[in-house]
Amino acid sequence: MRAPKLVLLLAGITLSLPALAADSDRWNLPVEVKKLDNGLTVVVSEDHSSPTVGVSVVYHVGMRLEPRNRTGFAHLFEHLMFEGTPNAPEGVFDKVITGGGGRNNGSTRADFTNYIETAPVSALESMLWLEADRMKTLDFNEKTLKNQQDVVKEEIRVNVKNQPYGGFMWIDIGQHAFQKWENNHDGYGSFKDLEGASLEDVRNFHRDYYGPNNAVLSIAGDVTPEQAFALAQKYFGGIAKRPTPAATDFSEGLNTAEKRIEQSDALAQVPAIAAAWKMPGRGSKDQAPMAVLGELLAGGDASIFYQGLVKGREMALNVDSLYGLTSPWEYDGPTLYTVFALYKPNGSADALLAAMDEEIAKVVDKGVDDATLKRVKTRMLADWYNGLESFMGRADTLAKLQTLWGDAKVANQIPGWIDAVTSEDVQRTARTYLTQANRTVIDRKPAPPAAAAAPAAAPAAGDKK
């Protein structure tokens, strides 16, 4: 991900009354979808509550599809997309959008790379021209490549190598939990692989994965579907579709034996664990129950793990959770539900894991009471709708759902899926997935302090110092 630049326009976060469904408890987004002749899928969500728009372009390529021996290449390429084209040299993209009162960013995940912008609606055509321009081609040159190789390496140093715990709860854990290279390699990349990327690699990657037929353009805000589709055709319609390599088979089943790894951390002050379980597949009947179960166990201060392990037994110092690097709805291959916790130096990973297992066993045996289940669902629904309020967040969510599910209107189904989850669903999902056999654990302990150097012996009489 590029350096954080997202300051959302306040004018773009108001819910529009026309978008509210007749049922006051359910907000149905207006969603229109059209595919251009070159294969570009265009998604539009009309909302005139403010004179702003959000734009997202999502390419169906991420860490799982990057070339072997080029780990981190999808992420490197995300950076290169901001380095200019023959028509818009380096710096023009940011200058045009920010000069028009907007913000932009991009990120790379396992199954997609997304580029997002928000600005007053008057800047919409400029944003679309810029996105179409870099979809056509980039300014491929050695200087730019070397510069961004160095930028990504520095990002790894800052965010991983020089941070306590680094990315062990999302980088290291996957390397041990998954069997296939597509799923278990370090998507941030090794320095050796990053340095080995050539201009030919970059050109080929852009040719293979950055064509219109491998992309979704989503526009949300103060624009009608007719206007948005016409603008998409104007700026993107002339870009020729390009062959996209077939994906390898990166599917894999649940694990059948627990994996335990111990690591040392020279920067950590207290020990930590990451416990990860393989998730249900996208579209599975267990996906929504797993999302609810994850929230029930580790979703905030009211969660079972926080109340039982942090406040109750005072074993852990905190509890947090991850669904890979996305959300429980935005993945298209093997993904982990991971719980991360710092624990007291006089404690142990074994004790903390045993306590987690006890809490999970209670859910398996007794389920969850109606009041707690309602609270969890309410929080999840609030978070879901809050994420759709900003036009940029809405455009991005719709683009990702269209890319991964083939249907942006899944955004209007997810609240119903959450609401339909029963206690029995939660029990079944906990019993099936949150088992010791399906679990991978990393116990990350502070490295022992380096031994102090012995004082130098005083020179003997007559010796030269």
Image (tube, rainbow, N blue to C red):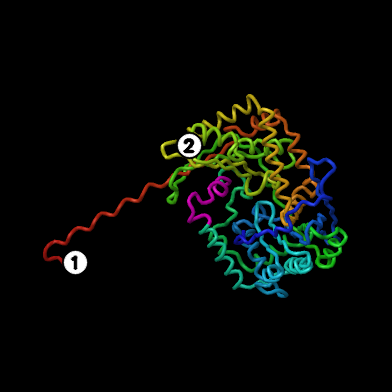
Residues 451 and 189: in front is 451
Q: Which residues are magenta?
A: 159-174
Q: Quadrant of residue 357?
A: top right
Q: Position of residue 236 (x, y in %)?
A: 81, 65
In reply to whether residue 353 is colored magenta, the answer given is no
Q: Which residue is mark 1?
A: 465
Give me the residue at 66% from left, 44% from top.
Answer: 334
The amino acid marked with disc number 2 is Ala
Q: Quadrant of the N terminus?
A: bottom right
For marks 2 and 1 on the same chain, the one whose residue lies earlier in the sequence: 2
Percent coordinates x, y for residue 119 in the rendering: 73, 64
Residue at (11, 63) in percent of width and height: 461
Residue farthest to the top? 365
Quarter residue 209 falls in: bottom right
Residue 245 visible in the displayed image:
no
Return the residue nearer the eye: 366 or 377: 377
Asked which quadrant contains residue 212, the reply is: bottom right
| Mark 2 or 1, closer to the camera | 2
Against 455, residue 94 (above or below) is: below
| Left or right of 36 in this view: 88 | left
Residue indicated by mark 2: 349
Asked whether 167 falls inside the magenta stretch, the response is yes
Is 257 in front, or is 361?
Answer: 361
Residue furthest to the left = 461
Predominant secondary structure, magenta span: helix
